[in-house]
């Protein structure tokens, strides 16, 4: 089981230099990855996640980096593809894209005129992921869909092959998001944003995704949670037994406490057997 940190891109972590320092400390302390929220504005200061991840990539050499999650329907597909592929090159293949349909009730979504029903956003997400996959292949593309129109000779292929890993968000009772996750590389247990997913529920989610998955490659299962110190491992171990491959340490309670955030990062990840 790998150990990641989940940091907001706002509040006390709302500066790229701060996130870069935390990423360097995380690498030194033995964490396997650092992932940031992807919001345009929650509270100030707020850092652009891709510029912050660039600074984090320069400050580190081994840990995995990415977003949890990017609301793909609000992004221009070529811009997102280029940002992710450039970061993949810069980091020597350490990037993961966490992807979701977005939640229009959030202030930073609705405040800037983004619209669309849940069904419309989901359809655009599915089409956009297909186009991202094609763009990162390096092959010419001709795609004329309801949400994306692309005609290009292709981008430089990503370092990671066949592409940058894509994790998608789902809840344990949502059949379509679970089926989407099965088509890609990982399922992000979105129920656990509120830290409410029990290991038994997580096991059910893993079973549902596995039942519809046709790929031979391993599936990542990302479970959020919070521990006060590296010795607090019981829930982490239970989630590992239920099928989680990533424990994502949830640092949001420290949004106004940068010293508390640094302290937990420097303590290192939960030490499971």
Image: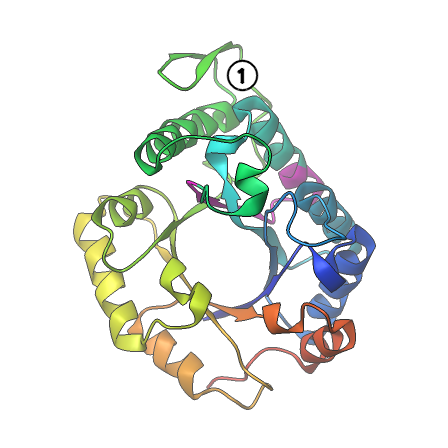
Q: In percent of the image, x 61 and y 26: which residue is there? A: 79
**Residue placed under numbered mark 1 in the picture:** 154
Q: In percent of the image, x 67 and y 79: which residue is there? A: 264
How packed mark 1 is, by other alpha carbons closer than 10 Å (few <14, some 14-19, many 20 or more), is some
- Give the x, y percent position of residue 229: 60, 86
Look at the image and say whether residue 114 sits in the magenta stretch.
Answer: no
Would residue 215 appear left or right of 259 to someone viewing this image? Answer: left
**Between residues 236 and 137, which one lies in front from this camera angle?**
236
- Give the x, y percent position of residue 11: 72, 60
Observer able to see residue 21:
yes
Look at the image and say whether residue 94 sits in the magenta stretch.
Answer: yes
Which range of residues does the magenta coloring cover?
Answer: 87-101
**Between residues 56 and 116, which one lies in front from this camera angle?**
116
- Give the x, y percent position of residue 133: 44, 30
Q: Quadrant of residue 31?
A: bottom right
- Give the x, y percent position of residue 261: 71, 73
Colour setting: rainbow
Q: Quadrant of residue 29?
A: bottom right
């Amino acid at each position: 089981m790998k150990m990641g940190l989940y940091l907001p891109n706002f509040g006390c972590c709302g500066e790229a230099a701060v996130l870069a320092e935390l990423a360097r400390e995380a690498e030194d302390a033995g964490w396997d990855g650092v992932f940031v929220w992807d919001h345009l504005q929650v509270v100030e200061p707020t850092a652009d996640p891709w510029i912050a991840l660039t600074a984090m990539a320069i400050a580190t050499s081994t840990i995995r980096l990415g977003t949890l999650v990017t609301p793909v329907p609000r992004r221009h597909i070529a811009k997102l593809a280029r940002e992710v592929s450039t970061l993949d090159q810069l980091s020597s293949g350490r990037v993961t894209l966490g992807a979701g349909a977005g939640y229009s009730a959030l202030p930073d979504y609705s405040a800037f005129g983004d619209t669309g029903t849940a069904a419309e956003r989901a359809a655009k997400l599915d089409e956009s992921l297909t186009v991202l996959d094609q763009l990162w292949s390096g092959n010419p593309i001709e795609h004329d869909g309801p949400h994306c129109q692309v005609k290009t000779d292709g981008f430089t292929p990503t370092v990671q092959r066949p592409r940058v890993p894509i994790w998608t968000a789902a809840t344990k009772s949502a059949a379509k998001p679970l089926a989407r996750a099965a088509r890609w590389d990982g399922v992000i247990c979105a129920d656990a944003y509120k830290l409410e997913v029990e290991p038994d529920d997580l096991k059910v989610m893993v079973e549902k995704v596995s039942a519809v998955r046709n790929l031979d490659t391993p599936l990542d299962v990302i479970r959020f949670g919070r521990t006060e110190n590296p010795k607090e491992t019981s829930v982490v171990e239970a989630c590992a037994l239920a099928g989680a491959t990533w424990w994502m340490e949830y640092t949001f309670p420290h949004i106004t406490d940068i010293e508390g955030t640094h302290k937990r990062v420097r303590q290192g990840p939960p030490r499971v057997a």
